[in-house]
Image (cartoon, rainbow, N blue to C red):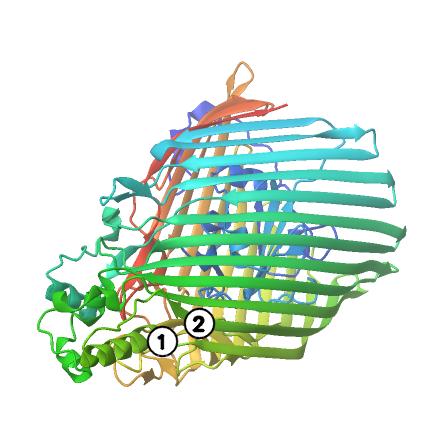
Amino acid sequence: MYRCIVPWGLACLVAADAWGQEDVLALDPVDVSARHRAEVTQDVPIAMTVLDGEQLEQAGHYGLRDIQQQAPGLVVSGHGPRHAGYGLRGFGATAYNDGLDSSVGIFVDGVYLGRQGMAFSDLLDIERIEVLRGPQGTLFGKNSSAGALNIATRQPTFHDEVEAEASFGSYGERRYRATLSGPLLDDVLAGRFSFVDRKRDGTVDNHYDGSSLNDIDSQALRGQLLWTPNEYLSARLIADVGRDDSANTVLPSHYSGQSDARAAALGYHILATAPFEREVWSNMPLKARNDQNALSLQLDWQMTDDLGLTSITAYRDWTLRDARDADGMDLSIAYLDTSLDQRQFSQELRLSGALGSDLDYVAGLYYLQQTLDRRHAVEFGQDASAWFVADRMDELSRLGLSLTHPSQVPSFLLDGGRQSITGEQKSDSRALFTHVTWRPWARLELTGGLRYTYERKQGWVARNVSGLVSLDGLPPIFQAGGELLRELALGDYYYRRDSVGEGDISSLLGASYRFNDQVLAYANWSRGHKAGGINFDVVGPRAAATFDAERATSLELGLKTRFWQQRASLDLALYQTDVDDYQALTLSQPEHIWMPPLRNNLLNVGKARLRGVELDSRWRLHSRMDMRLGVAWSDARYRSFDNAPCGPGLAPSLCDYSGKRLYNAPEWNASAGLDYHHPVGRGLEGFTGLEQSVRSGYYGTLEGGKGSWQPGHGLTNLRMGLRASDHGWEVEFWVRNLFDKDYITAVYASLGLGDYAVMPGDPRTMGMTMRVRL
C-alpha cells in the first residue's frame, strides 16, 4: 500500500513498489558564508534564503529576474538593465534615476556591483545565492538598507571537471554552457574557464516592419586561477567579460485623456492597450546593448590558527546603450537615445579571527570609487509639433498662432530638434566595520556590529537643445509663437553642479539561544544606511537637486528548527523595519500645458514602516523526494508622506499618502517546489520537478496611476527527464509558465502625463536540455 502525501498529487503517479522501505534520512546541510566563515544556514541567526546554483540551472533560472520565483519577498523589476531595481521586504525596487544606489546590495564573490544593471543579465557558474533580508552593513564592504544578495561562484578545482550543456526551446531558444576546470600545477595552481551563450527570438511582433522584439542575445566568459603555494596562503584571480544585446520593449497599458484627445484630433487610430497581445507599431529601431568587464583578486592568508587576513581588489566597467521609440507608435514623435558608462574600483581588507573558543570577530576596511558618465538625448520627428499641440488648438491663438487643425502646425517647429541631457557623477565611499560574536555559555550567542561610513558624491548635469531650423523669414507673429512653443516644450540651456558628503554609523545588536540541537531562536536589532545623492537629471519644482540619506531601523525575531528526525527544517522570522527618508521617484506635474512631466526625480519619503512574517522550509519526504515551501507576508506602508505627487489628472498636485501601501511591494509572496527521482534500471534514473510561485498584486509606480497596477499571478514550471545514476549525463524536457498565465514584470511611465507601458512576462515556453559531466 502507498498513499498520496503531497498536495500536488505527484507522488500518486508513482507505482506502489517504487516507495519500498523508507530509510531514516536527513536533509543535506546548506553551507553559507554570510558571516565570512564556513557555516550551515541553521546555525546563522539571520533571515535568509539560500539558493543552490546547480538546482537553479536545472530549473532554468539563469538570472536574478528568475530567482525571485524561489525567494519570497524579493522583487526584481525593470524592463532592461538601465531600469533594473531590486527590493526586499517591500522596499528598494526603485532604479529609474541613474544617480540612485540600490537599497539591496549585490555582491559577487565579495565585490559590490555599483549599478543594478550589472546583475541583470544571465549569471554564470554559480555556486549559491544567499538572499539576506534586513539591513546589512557590519559584515559587507558596502552598506545596504534593505538587504543583500551574496552571490558565490564556483572556484577552480584540483581535479579534472568538464561540464557541457545545450538547451533548445520555444521562440528559437538555444543556450550553450560549458565549464572546464582542473589543475595546472599539482596542488599549487588550478584554473577554471566557463562560458555561456544564450539566444532567443522575440515574443513581441512589430507590425510596422515585421521584426520581433523582446529577444535574448547574451554571452559571458569567465576565467579563473587559484594559487595555493602552501596551506596558509591562497590567491584567486577572476576575469569576467559579458555582453548582452537583448532588445526589450514595453507595451502600452493605459493612455491618458490627453493622449486620446491628441490622437482623435489628428485622426490617428491609437494602438489598443492590450499588452498581452504582444503587438506594437513602432517605426523607430530598438537598439540595446550592455557590455561588462571585471577583474578581481582575492588573497587569503591564514596568519595563525586563529587569525586570517582577506584582501579583495576589484575593477569593473559597464557600458550601456539604449535607444528606443519614445511614443511606441508609427508616428515620428520622439526617439530616445541613452548611453551610460560606469567604472568602479574597490578595495577591501578584512581580518577574521577568534579569541579562544568563545569569541569570533571580523574587522574590515573598505574603499569604493565610482565614475558614471551619462548621455541622454530626445530626438523629435516630423509629427512632434502636431502631436504636442493637437489637443490645445485653442491655446495656440494665445501664442499668436491662429490655426484650425493640427495638420497646419509647421512640422519644422520641432522636427530635427534634439534635447541632450549629459552629466557625470563621481563618488567614493570609505568604511570601517566590525562584527563580533561572543558565546558566554555554550547555548547563548551574543552579536554586536558597528560600522562607520563616509561617502562623497559630486557631479554635474547639463541640458542643451540643438538641430532646430531657424524661424527667420516667417511672419513675426509665427516667429514669436514658435520660439515660445520651443522654449516651453524643449526647455532652454540648463546647467548645475552639486556635491554631497556625509558620515554615518550603522550598528547591529543580536542574541541567539540554542534550546537543543534542533531549535535556534534569535533576536536582532540593526540599523542600516544608504547614502544620499544627486538628482542625476533636470529637476522639477517638486524635487531638490540633491536628496538625503535613507536610514532603516529593523527589529527581527526568528526561529530556526529541524524536526522529523532531521528530515525537515523550518525558518520563521517576524520583523518590523522603520525607514526614514525613504528614497523614491516622484512624478512632477508640468507647470505649463506645453511642458512634459518630469518623472524620474528623486525625493525623500518622510517615514515608511515595513512589517511582516517570513517562512522558509525544506522537507525530505522520502529518500527520493524533496520539497521546499516559502511564504512571505509584508505590510509595507507610508507612515508620513503628505507631500506625495498625486496621480495623473488629479488635483491638487500634492496628496497625502500616509497609511497607503508602498509601490513595488506585494503583500503576499509564496514559492513551492517538489523534486522526485526514481531508478529505472540499467544504471538510469528518471526525475521530475514541479515549481509553483504566487504573488499578490501591487502598484509599480509611486503615484499609482491607472495602468500601473500589476495584478497578482501564479506561475507553474514543470520538468522531467532521464539521467545516468551517477549524474554523468541527463536529458531534460521542460515547460515554463505551464498554464500560459499573463503577468507583468515591470511598469514604465511613458511619453505623456498618465501614459503607462508594461513589460509582459514570458508566455508558455517549452524545450529540452542536455547535460554532460565528466
Q: Residue at x 43, y 54 (%)?
A: 322
Q: Residue furthest left?
A: 404
Q: Residue furthest right?
A: 304
Q: Residue at x 17, y 58 (%)?
A: 270
Q: Determine which residue is flagged by label 1.
A: 491
User: Viewed as shown, does residue 395 lie left or right of 360?
Assistant: left
Instruction: In this rendered view, identify the residue nearer to me: 433 or 442.
Output: 433
Instruction: In this rendered view, identify the residue nearer to me: 506 or 227.
Output: 227
Give the residue type at disc 1. Gly
Q: Looking at the image, do the residues carrying marks 1 and 2 touch, with CB atoms under 8 Å apart?
A: yes
User: Cα distance, mark 1 to mark 2?
Assistant: 8 Å
Q: Determine which residue is flagged by label 2.
A: 463
Q: Characterize the local packing of mark 2: few (<14), some (14-19) or many (20 or more) Cα atoms within 10 angstroms.
A: many
Q: How many marks?
A: 2
Q: Characterize the local packing of mark 1: few (<14), some (14-19) or many (20 or more) Cα atoms within 10 angstroms.
A: some
User: Viewed as shown, does residue 732 lie left or right of 746?
Assistant: right
Q: State whether residue 348 is above or below residue 511.
A: above
Give the residue type at disc 2. Arg
